[in-house]
Amino acid sequence: MANKNRASLGIIFITIFIDLMGFGILIPILPTFASKDLGISDFGIGVIIAAYSLMQFIFNPVLGRLSDRIGRRPVILATQLMTASSYIIFAFSNSFALLLFSRMLAGLGGSNIGVAQAYIADITSREERAKGMGVIGAAFGMGFVFGPLIGAFLAKYGYHVAGLGSAVFTLSAFTFAIFKLPESIREKKSAGKFQLKIFDLKFSKQVLQHPIIGFLIILYFFIIFSIANIYGTFAILGYKYYHFTDQQNGMLFGINGIVATIIQAGFIKSFSRKMSDKTIVMIGIVFMVFALGLLPYGGNFAGVAFVISLMGIGGGILQPIIPSMISKHSPEHQQGETLGFNQSISAFARVLGPLWGGFAFQVFGYQFPFLTGAFFTLLSLIACFYFLRTDKLEEPQSV
């Protein structure tokens, strides 16, 4: 990898890390803030969390197409400003409606992950793609190490302080990107008129019919849905049933992030050299099955910390490897659109997951969101074993 591209990887890592640290600040405290301060029900919390992902579902492919046309850099900068604004609104939220609006705006701003993945694809070879995607995974992991810990600390001084802290970190990432983040594509799409399509059915059908990309996108959907069942329920589980404090919940999210970062920084490249992509994916799913199934039975802080570490291993493997596989089999001129579509589908999983998780938690009992996740990851493992053919993964195919 050329030195210039290595430098760009480092810059996009710092940009995403600071941005995701702002996001991570709110992860362990948003459910308890909504429950304790605003009196929102468990299902209502699921709706608020799902709204964030609904916006990503709608706008991920739009921003992906836009970045193919005008460049990655301006899209990343604009979305960071939207995200910072959402955190300021969160800091002053005093009702369900205002909190919901803040999360919808944050979801629009957070619809840039597909663009960031396309940025990585622009500056890496196919052989280096998994390592490059690991940069985003590592930024996520470290953001979820420091963000929740900082958020839990700031929450002691008030939830509004945590919201303003998130805004400061995101604005810092925006400032850094203005001066340091170069454009990654040399030739932007110029033919034809740009259409603001919310969902391109023709392109979606084309991508999903591809024997490898289609399967990987569907596989990613079920994995993300399984994990998303716990987005709003994990902190409530700790608060209501284990009597964890915001600080303890923050530490648990931090442990998950530390483990995921170690996996992505230290093992993904080694795994890619020694094992097939199919084997790596299946190993990651196995860890997810056990982690999700055991989470409601951790018993105490140490037990839950051990189980959340298993989830960190699974997420640390799966987050970079599946988008990398999708990118390898996507045409170069459609990297942004294809990866944006994948992020959109996974965002839809993040819509359904919290909705079902909050409903199941409130109606059927606290175990059900976690057991639902374990069930669907087990189905994903079986499907991967039978339908993901290693020989077809060896050679890139066009859409």
Image: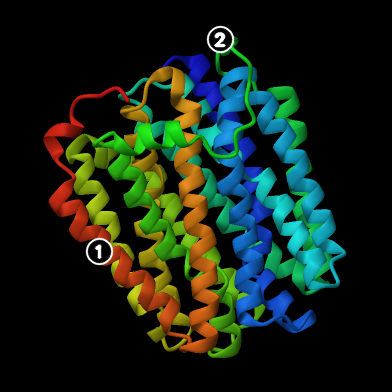
Say which label, 1 or 2, has the lower sequence index: 2
Does 149 appear above or below 178? below
Residue type at tag 1: Leu
Residue 12 horizontal side relative to residue 368, left or right: right
Residue 30 horizontal side relative to residue 97, left or right: left
The quarter of the displayed image where residue 191 is located: top right
Q: Tell me if I can see residue 219 in this picture.
A: yes
Q: Depth-wise, is mark 1 or mark 2 nearer the camera?
A: 1
Residue ID at (32%, 28%): 328
Instruction: Look at the numbered disc 1 and give the secondary structure of its residue.
Output: helix
Residue ID at (23%, 41%): 277
The residue identified by callout 1 is 379
Residue ID at (42%, 70%): 308
What quarter of the picture does the C terminus occupy?
Answer: top left
Q: Position of residue 112 (x, y in %)?
A: 60, 38
Q: Position of residue 245 (x, y in %)?
A: 64, 82
Residue ID at (68%, 63%): 26
